[in-house]
Amino acid sequence: MEPNGASEAVVPPPQKPETELTTENNTISSNPTLSKNAQKKLAKQQRWEAKKIEKKAAAKEQKKKELERKRKEWDESLANMSEEERTKLIESRISLRKERMEKTLEEKQCRKERLVKAKEHGQNVVVDLEFSHLMISSEIRSLVQQIMYCYAANGRCESPAHLWLTGCEGEMDDQLKKIPGFDKWIIEKEDKSYIEVLQDRKDDMVYLTADSETVLEELDLKKIYIIGGLVDRNRNKGITLEKAQKQGIQTAKLPIGNFLTMSSSQVLTVNQVLEIILKFLETRDWKTSFFAVIPQRKRTQADSEGNADNTVEEEKECEQNDDLMACKNQCVEEEEIEQKDDLMASKKQCVEEIPSNC
Ligand SMILES: C[S@@+](CC[C@H](N)C(=O)[O-])C[C@H]1O[C@@H](n2cnc3c(N)ncnc32)[C@H](O)[C@@H]1O
């Protein structure tokens, strides 16, 4: 195999990607060992990463400005008020904030109860994290983001799945631990492989892979569905199929082709696959589930021009940047709330915080 999966059709041996991706942003020098195609792909990835960093910095700057503007506005409106009006306004904001916090706490409690219940009765879904040696750091980070989406989507469900993260080791584990509040997630997290952890349930395991010959018709509560924890622009095509076959585990692909035409490949991201499963658990209807999760532009022929097979993750990531911020904020917010014994934080603190929330 060529370094870093240059050849798409070949299943690579389990080895660390070569070090032509040396910097944080995966900067590559022209490496003679890379095929033209692989160089193009990496250059594209590099451009996309640079753009992502730029966008992030611009968004941060914008947020800072917005906060300053609101703070100024708030100070000005307070300055133009009588003492009585000022007290009234501050108190109304405090009570609004208290209400919001109470609502968040209530929602959090409900979510917790649903997730605890899912441990007993929910559909088992494993995310197999044993592929980190095939990913560069930015891909691992991207996978961690997808896991955050998975957890958030599962928490929002009325009947969530029982989620497992198996093979959590090394950099993958380090990155996961960086998620605010991760230690409190209601999820099964194992450093061992699913094959060891759930060894008596091997016959119930179904490895989901777009390369399977078997089409998934239904979801069976007794089964354990496994999703490959990989962000690889599908350069390791067939790797999960091969792994499952070696382990003697059943495989299946989502019945995408029965319901819609994709503009490129049918290989979806980890969170898309989980979200489809969750939607199907709720609706028992594949078509609804696919249409709810797969972005419109990936569904029509017209969109295919200029779209490489491997753009699914990239595009989804760009599209979900805002979602991710919301998801991160939610984690931080919950963490903060948990640490507060008293909902009524001091008046001073509330007043200081109001401008950012008004
Ligand atoms: C980005 S894909 C990884 C692609 C990887 N090259 C492979 O061979 O699996 C992430 C995971 O989502 C699941 N997946 C993606 N598309 C799927 C599909 N159409 N049907 C079933 N599972 C799918 C698989 O478990 C897959 O490993």
Image (cartoon, rainbow, N blue to C red):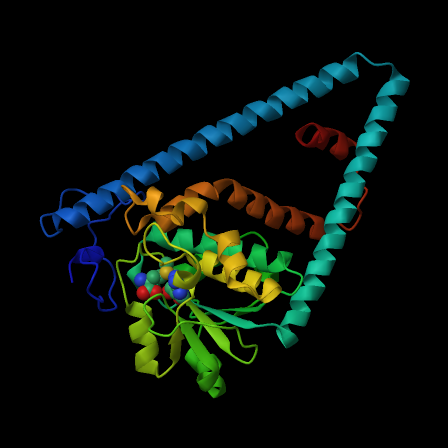
Question: How many numbered circles are shown?
Answer: 0
Residue at 42%, 61% in the rendered image: 256
Q: Nearer the viewer, residue 249 or 217?
A: 217
Up the image or down, 223 lies above or below 28; here it is below
- Considering every residue shown, the one lying at the far left of the view is 32
* Residue 169 visible to the viewer: no
Please give left or right for residue 154 compared with residue 56 in the image. Answer: right
Residue at 52%, 73% in the rendered image: 219
Q: Nearer the viewer, residue 158 or 99?
A: 158
Tell me if residue 281 can be seen.
yes
Q: Position of residue 112 (x, y in %)?
A: 69, 62
Quadrant showing the N terminus = bottom left
- Spot the residue most to the bottom: 200
- Residue 212: name its quadrant: bottom left
In the image, residue 171 sits, relative to residue 52, either above or below, namely: below
Where is residue 288? Give x, y as percent.
54, 57
Q: Residue at 67% x, 22% y: name it.
A: 71
Rendered location of residue 83, percent (x, y): 88, 17
Which quadrant of the structure image shows residue 124?
bottom right
